[in-house]
Amino acid sequence: MIIISYTVVILNPSKEYGTTIAAGDSHNIENPEYMGALLDAISIAAEAEKGEFVIPLLLQRMCISVSATSSVLYALSDDGRSLIPRVGWGKYDPDIIGRPYPVRERGEWESLLSGKSDMLSGYSESDETNFLAVPVRSGGKISCILELKREERFFKDEKNLVHGFANIIGMNYYTAGLAKSKAVMDEGIKKILDMSSFAAITVSADGTVMELNPQGSAFTGYGEHEIKGSSIKRLLMVTPQGHVICIKKNGEEVPVSITSLHFSRGEGDVILHLIKPPQDEDKIMEYRDTLEGIITRSPFGILVTDSNGNCVTVNDALVKMLDIKQEHMVNKYNLLEDPLLESHGLMPRIKRVYDSGDAAELIIPYDISRLPKKVEKPHIKILRMILFPVMGPEHKIKNVIAVIEDLTERKAMEKDVLERTRELAILNEVSRLIVSTATLDELIDVMVNNFNKVINADNCYITLYDEDERKYYFAAATADVNAIFSGQRFDYSENDKNKTLSQVVMESKKPLAIEDIRDHPLCESDRRLVKLLGIKSLLVLPMFVGNKFIGTISVDSVKRKRKFKNGEIDLMMTITNQASIMIERAKLFGELLSANKQILKSYEKLRDFDKMKTDFITITSHELRTPLTSIHGYTELMKDGAFGPLTGVQKDKLRVIDRNVNRMMTVVENLSELSQSGSISFDVKKERASIYDIVDVSVSAIRPVASSKNIDLTVKMSPGLPSVCVDKSKIIRVIDNLLDNAVKFTPPGGRICVYVSATPKNVHVEVKDTGIGIPEEDLKKIFTGFYRVGYRPSYQYTGVGIGLAIAKGIVEAHDGSIWAESKVNAGSTFHFTIPRCD
C-alpha cells in the first residue's frame, strides 16, 4: 500500500511572525482613545477561531477609528511582480478586487516593498484625497500593502494606530490562509487525478465509492454517477490467494495490480486506488516512470529503502532539507538501525511497516548532525515522516518509501502564534486593568503584580523620577523586594560609575536588556539589589510621556540566564508606554485632588473672614447709628432756634452739617444692608431734575475740603443741558462719592474738574483728577465692595472702600452706566451716564 501525504503552503511564512504590535520608539501611542481602539482589534484577532477571516471587520474598525473613507488590502503575488487587491472597505471601486496591478505601476510603493520605509503618506491629485500606505508583515516578510484614504491628512498618532492594525491584519492573513490552503490542495489533487492516465477510484474510510476518474470509467465500464455511493466491493475483490480482481460492469473479472494512496481531505481520510492490468507491461513501466518522476520532482524529501531498511535512493529535496549528500546515504544508511529513532521509542512502529505492511506517520525531533556526514553542532529539525510499503510479487514488501516533511519552521510559527496569542490576551487584560485604575498607588500595584506575567519574568520593579529633586525613588516591587527597598531614593549622578540603570535608560531613551548581569557595570545600589535577589538577567524599560521622563519598569530572571527577544521587548514597551500615560494621568489626578482640598480649606478660611467682616460691619453700623442720631437731633433743634437765634452763615453751616450727617446715616444703613445680604441694592424715586442743581450741590459741599488741600476744583458744563429723570438725592450721592475720592487721592496742589455733557439719549458726567491713579489690573475691582487702592502706602486714606460700589448700584438702578479710566501717577477719570428726560 502506498501512502502519500501533502503539506500546507503558506504565503511568506516567517518564524518572527507577529512579534510587534504598534510598539517601539517610532510607533508610540499616547492617545488613550486610540489605545482603546487597538486593544479592541487585538481582542478580535485573539478571540478569532483558527482560520476565521476577520480582516474585513478589522478594516472597518480601523477606518472608523481614524475617520478614513476607504481602505484596501493589496496582496503581493508569489512572484513578487504584481499587487492584487484582496479586501476593501468603504468608498472604493469594487471592480479592482482580484485584478492584478504590476508593481512597476505603483513605483511609489517600492520603498515599502523593499523594507526601506515603514510608511508612505501624501496627497493624491487624481481623486483629491490624502492617502496612507503601510506594509503588512506576516512575520519578517512583507505580504501585503494596506492603503487608507480620506480628505484630511493623517497625523502621527493615527499613523501609529494604523501600523498596529497592519500587524494584527498580518496575523489574521496568515492564520486564515493556513485553514484555506487544504481546500485549495484538495481541489488541485482532484484535477491531477482527472488528467491521470491511470484508472483511479476514491473511496471513503468506510469503503464507499466517492469519485471515479474518466480513465476509471473507461476501464470498468461504469459512469461515475452509476457507481458513486456504492461499496468498493462492487468493483474489487481479493481472492484467497491474495490476488486482486476487478469486476467490470459487463461482469468480466480481470486480474489487476492495485496501488492505494491514503491522504486527508476536507471531508476526512480518503483512500485512492490506482488500478493497473498486470499483463500490460507498458502501463506498468509508465506507472514506474510516473512514480520515479514524483519522487524526483516532489517538494517533500523522499527516502526509499529495500525490504531490509537499507537506503536505495534519496531525492534532491531530502538532500537539501537535511544538508546531506546522496553518497553518504545510499547503501550506507539503514532506517531500521537508526539509533536516534530507537532512542525516541519509534522503532517498533517502523518495524511494523516492514513486517505487516501497515503505514505509519511519525513526528520526530531529529538531530541532523547524527546523519552519516561531516560532524556539526547539534541541529534539531522537527520532521514528519510517513512510511508506506511498496508491494512486489506475491504480495511481499519490495520497498518502503519514507516521505519526509520539514515542520521545523511551521512548528516554530505555530508556537510563536500561540505565544503571541497568549501575550495578546495578557496584554488585553493588563491594559484593561491599567485603564480602569485611577489613583497612582492602585495603578502601581496593578503594574507591579502583572507586568512580569506578560513575558513570564520573575520579579517586577518600578522606579519613579522626581524631577524637582532630581532623585529616583523605589516606588514598588514584588512583595519580597518591596519590603526591603520601598521608599529608598537614589541621586541623579554626573559620574558614570554612580549612575543607576534607571538613569542610564533615561539618558538613552531606549530599553536596556542585560542577558548576563555579571558582565554589566553596576552602581552600588543596583549591585545590592542584584546580589540580594540573585538576578541573572534584567530588562529595564524607560517610561516617557513626550519628552518627560516618568521612571522605569524592570523585570528580571533569577532562575536562569535569559536573552530577552526583540518581540518581548517591543510588547513590554507597548504596555510601558500606555502605563506611562496612565501614571502621569494618575499624578495629575492626585494633584487635582490635593489642589481641590486646598481650595476647600481656603474657601473655609475666606468664609470665616467674611463672617468676621460681616460681624464687624454689623457692630460698627450699630455703634455709629446712635451718635449720628444724636448729632442729627441736636442739629434740627439748633436750626429750629431752640438754643437761640442763628445768623445766616450759621444756618448755612448747619445745613452742610445736616446734609453730611444724613449722608453718614445713609452709609451706615448701606453697611447694615451689605452685612445682611452681601450686596447693595437701591430703591429709587425718579423725578424731573436739573443736572445743574445736582452738580452745584455736590461741588459746593466738597469745595471747602478741596481748598484746604490747595486743590483747584473747576466745573465745565455744556450750555442747554436737558433735564434728567432721577432720584435727586441719590445722584448727588454718586457725585459726592466721586468728588470725595478725587480729593482724597489727589496730592496738594493738584486739579479736579467736573465735565457735564449730553448725548442723544443720556447725560454724561466726568470727574477728572490729577491724583495717584489706579493700576490697570485693579480697574475691574474698584466697583466691588471694600476695595481700596493700597499700592501707595505713603498716603493715609480713610474710608471703608464701599463708595464706588454704592455709586455703581445707584447708577445702574437708574439704567445708567459707570466706568473709570486711569494710569498710575497720571490721574483718573470717572464717568457715569444717566438717561435724559426730554
Image: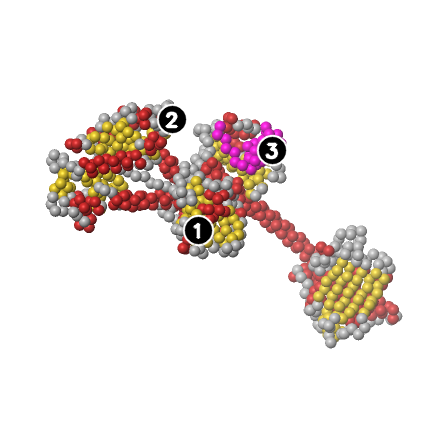
Q: Nearer the viewer, mark 1 or mark 3?
A: 1
* Mark 1 vs 3: CB contact within 8 A: no
Looking at the image, residue 357 lies above or below residue 103: above
Label annotation for residue 378: 2
Say if the magenta span includes residue 536.
no
Q: Which stretch is magenta? A: 487-516
Q: Is residue 241 left or right of residue 789?
A: left
Residue 594 at least partly seen: yes
Q: Secondary structure at mark 2?
A: loop
* Mark 3 vs 2: CB contact within 8 A: no
Three-letter code for the amino acid on which mark 2 is drawn:
Pro
**Quick one: label 2, few (<14), some, or many (20+) residues within 10 Å?**
few
Say which residue label 3 marks: 491
Three-letter code for the amino acid on which mark 3 is drawn:
Asp
Looking at the rendered structure, the number of numbered marks drawn on it comes to: 3
- For the residue pair 435 and 2, the one nearer the viewer reads as 2
Label 1 or label 2, whichever comes before in sequence order: 1
Q: Is residue 490 left or right of residue 286?
A: right
Looking at the image, residue 132 lies above or below residue 838: above
Say which residue label 1 marks: 72
